[in-house]
Image: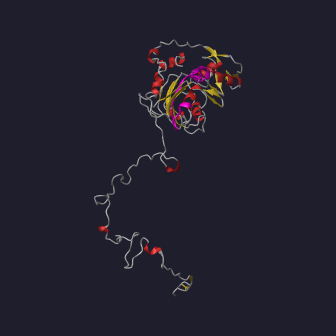
Amino acid sequence: MEDNKNGGYSAEGRKLRPRKKVSFENSERRSDYGHRNDNGERRNYEGGERRSYNKPYGERRSFGEDGGRRPYNGAGRKPYGAPQGPKPARGKGGRKKFEPQFDESPESGIYRMIERRPNIDAAQYSDNDYVKTPIQNEIRLNKFIANSGVCSRREADTLIQAGVVTVNGEVVTELGTKVNVLNDDVRFNGERLRGEEKVYIVMNKPKGYVTTSSDPHAGKTVMDLLKGCDTRVFPVGRLDKATTGVLMFTNDGEIAERLTHPSYDKKKIYQVILDRELSQEDYDKVLTGIELSDGEVSADELEYIDATDHRRLGIEIHSGKNRIVRRIFESLGYTVKALDRVYFAGLTKKGLNKGEWRYLTEGEVNILKMGAYV
């Protein structure tokens, strides 16, 4: 093969490019890291002593302050195949995601607000101390539908007028119609309704679950957490996907309406974590009233639940408007980082971990029916 100093051809007959002459004269790169000095020895960037690139394997620099080599399973390292544990949640840019935490201890400031609510011992109302309404053979059609767990009485009237309810095969649209509980065949959209046993449940709702019982496209719903409950129930009121805390379920439409309708003014207590401390001026505004797009709203009570951190508050409110607590603080320029309902119509999440639920006791149910809690 010809020398390709000035071009030429390879043994395979390919044209060779002429070699370029590279000169390092008057160039600062001669002293760069990795180049040799005048004696042919390698030099580091600062021109110091020769690095030990060519030392035998056993003479290479060891790891650790004591000169010993780092073992394979050294501090902070796990052997191959060992479980690594869950990875921390990450936000944008791969940074660790901030998850605000509530103080769940009984000494927490939020429980001072709960203790000021009327304290009724549910145990005193068990063992049939409450006189229950006797079973009637004939009741109004809307009440029968509500007792079957379909909806509230008010909503049942709408269904009746829409012509989707039949009694003994005949469509009934007249309000006030009475039916015989034992003998009449009442159907809603072709499905027969029965006087089911009433069930009352309280849950500590976790974050990430949608409060719905009928949307198949909602992803994770609170109904997925009710494993072991064979009775068809529905959530009473709503908590948005990011909100946690007390959530009630029942198939008693009458109780559900009494707990959620604005005319009953049922109290709810939330603990809130804001993105920054609430100023005294905005604190006063929340108590005196704030004008929102659907009217004015004010908190019944508001207090700092952590004396050293004014981002953490407890708020008591009776309004049942959608996302009302978040909207109050967002209207003042704050972002709600975490929201937890700790009290609803006399019910708390005491003894329940996130995602757990329990049936109400007889005494708790009787108190709800009496309306003793405001």
Residue 259 lies, with reference to residue 71, above or below; the image says above
Residue 157 lies, with reference to residue 328, above or below; the image says above
Residue 161 versus residue 106: which sits nearer the camera?
Answer: 106
Residue 333 lies, with reference to residue 301, above or below; the image says below
Q: Quadrant of the C terminus?
A: top right
Is residue 194 in view from this perspective? no
Residue 334 lies, with reference to residue 58, above or below; the image says above
The answer to which quarter of the image holds residue 106 is top left
Is residue 190 in view from this perspective? yes
Residue 57 image offset from top left, x and y in percent: 32, 68
Q: Residue at x 71, y 23 (%)?
A: 161
Residue 61 versus residue 231: which sits nearer the camera?
Answer: 61
Q: Residue at x 52, y 24 (%)?
A: 200
Which color scheme did the rendering employ for the protein? secondary structure
Residue 201 image offset from top left, x and y in percent: 50, 26
Residue 203 image offset from top left, x and y in percent: 49, 29
- Residue 130 is one of the magenta-drawn residues: no
Residue 147 versus residue 188: which sits nearer the camera?
Answer: 147
The answer to which quarter of the image holds residue 369 is top right
Tally of marks: 0
Magenta-colored span? 252-281
Residue 102 image offset from top left, x and y in percent: 46, 34
Residue 260 versus residue 356: which sits nearer the camera?
Answer: 260
Q: Residue at x 69, y 23 (%)?
A: 160
- Residue 254 is one of the magenta-drawn residues: yes
The answer to which quarter of the image holds residue 45 is bottom left
